Image (cartoon, rainbow, N blue to C red):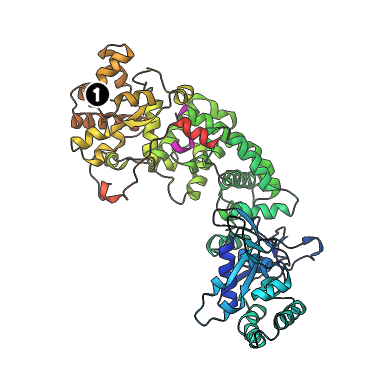
Amino acid sequence: MGGPSCQSSSGSWKWDTDRIRDRLASVSLHYPIGVVMMLEIGGEDVHFAPRPIAGVDGSHLHKPSQLILDGQQRLTSLFQSLFSGKPVDTMDARGKKLKRWYYIDINQALEPDGDREEAIAGVPENRVLKDWRGAILADYSTKDKECRAEQFPLSLAFTMPAVFDWAQTYQQGVSGQDPDRIARWNTFYEQVLRNFVHYTVPVIILKKETPKEAVCTVFEKVNTGGIVLNVFELLTATFASEDFRLNDDWKERKERLNQYSALRSIEDTDFLQSVALLATRARREEHSHTGGDSGQAPGIGCKRRDILRLSLHQYKQWADRVEEAFVWAATFLAHERIFLARDLPYRTQLVPLAAIRVALGHDAEKIGVSEKLARWYWCGVLGELYGGTTETRFARDLAEVVEWIRGADEPSTIKEATFNADRFLTLRTRNSAAYKGIYALLMRGGCRDWLENKDVDLASFFNYSIDIHHVFPKKWCLDHKVDAHMRESIVNKTPLSARTNRIIGARAPSRYLASLTKQAEITSRTLDSILETHSIDATTLHADDFEGFFEARRGALITVISRAMGKDVIQVAVEGPETPDAFVEEPEELEESPMEELEQAS
């Protein structure tokens, strides 16, 4: 084993004590623990601010020649337990922080059929093991006590004078009582301890010419033993070399964005993607304005390589405007009646939306522009176009939507979006973007609560704990053997207050409608008009006619969807119809009030 190396990761040391014991056991048996990958420093495309392995005193280190790419956790565990001379900072299985020294039981280690991991123990910082009552189980607080218990401290493994001193005490400590003690030590040293001293780890060294995007691929696809360094962490390390703490900057921005409940799922990479879209767009526009070279103009993008090529100047140039655009997006979403992160159809669609807002500036506030942006948004949601690899679509969105606003042809997202009416039978939980989209569109269309008779806006949504609930109650449907796909379909659900839903209970619609008219002190005709705001044919509810209700509401929702997308819904069977059997069965959805979610997120 060599000395400590530096790492490029901003991730922290996090292995628990059981995992450390397992790794020590593997080394003691000379079993392989995997390949370590290193990166040479000095390349033109890779500039990371190094930091030492956790536990290393970095004040006296020279500038490293290599950085650890894959193997940080393994090397940290071995360095701290075998080489540092200090107790290891670790944790138990519950995440409780611990400080541990590691010992190996000589006798257990020499058992032919023994469990080597069981032979290794982690003991507290004071080297005294106690039970839950405080009674002492073992005391290794002095060298004599360690030798008497035949527990070798692995922290001495690489300090040969200390090893020989410990061995002498071990061999002489109980002279005459155990004539085989010397032989046992010799066997232990040859079969166990030498494995630590002479252990070798295969190393792959990436040359300094390796491009930064290739380094990121290593972290995302190769590193499986510890913390994966993603593109945000790589950029954090890059900016650290210019004395800028990207992680701290993002934490402050994230706190401000979290003030808006719909934005609480936004991730650091989402933010960087929006910045990269704008930076690459600016580069493309500059190329166009200056005439550029004869070659092809640089493209707009937010893939890994685009983010990794961001300079600190570019980040600072766009970050504030991107943050403002995300805040604007929260207002946009509220207008579309999306108030909570859990009800956001696609978090990723906010990436191009924020970039588009920055590119349009205050023009985005104009009525006609807002209507176009809403149409683009709902085509993406109801066409379910943001569920897979989307970076290419993001880039197209930024270019095409801005051009469309300024008079060009419709963007690809609108052209490609389709909604097939067969999809209704498979939209059953919030796992589906279109399910959440239809829920929001009903509120956006002016549906009113059946008891409170209030339009759903930001205030009433939270004040009345609006959520999506069954129209024909689940129990009623089960009792009447309604097909599960129709029962749980978005067609049989609608936004209602918690109070209204309690009145509905498990009763037939004809019965709960009578209760609602009585408690709300309104006529049946007034209640029927409120039901119409939910695209519900009231006569089918009064008659407890589920099939009639389902068919009528299905048609009404088709109209709602067509208006939002600005195009017709497909209502004829096509090749490969989206039948229920074509989808993985979704888990039962737990109903939770929006207020409870807000309290948990606060």
Tell me: residue 186, above or below residue 421.
below
Q: Residue furthest right?
A: 60
Position in image of residue 568 (x %, y %):
31, 35
Q: Please tell me which residue is depicted at 29% across the width and 28% down the height of the picture.
A: 505
Is residue 467 in the magenta section? no
Give the side of residue 226 with respect to residue 101, left or right. left
Q: Please tell me which residue is depicted at 25% across the width and 14% down the height of the picture.
A: 524
| Disc 1, SS | loop
Tell me: residue 164, above or below residue 594.
below
Towards the viewer: 62 or 479: 479
Position in image of residue 253 (x %, y %):
63, 39
Q: Please tell me which residue is depicted at 51% across the width and 39% down the height of the picture.
A: 350
Query: Magenta region's main secondary structure?
Result: loop
Query: Can residue 339 be seen in this snapshot?
Result: no
User: What range of the chain is rendered magenta?
Assistant: 335-344
Towards the viewer: 306 or 556: 556
- Which quarter of the figure is the N terminus placed in? bottom right
The quarter holding residue 193 reads bottom right
The quarter holding residue 148 reads bottom right
Pointer 1 residue: 537
- Which quarter of the figure is the C terminus placed in? top right
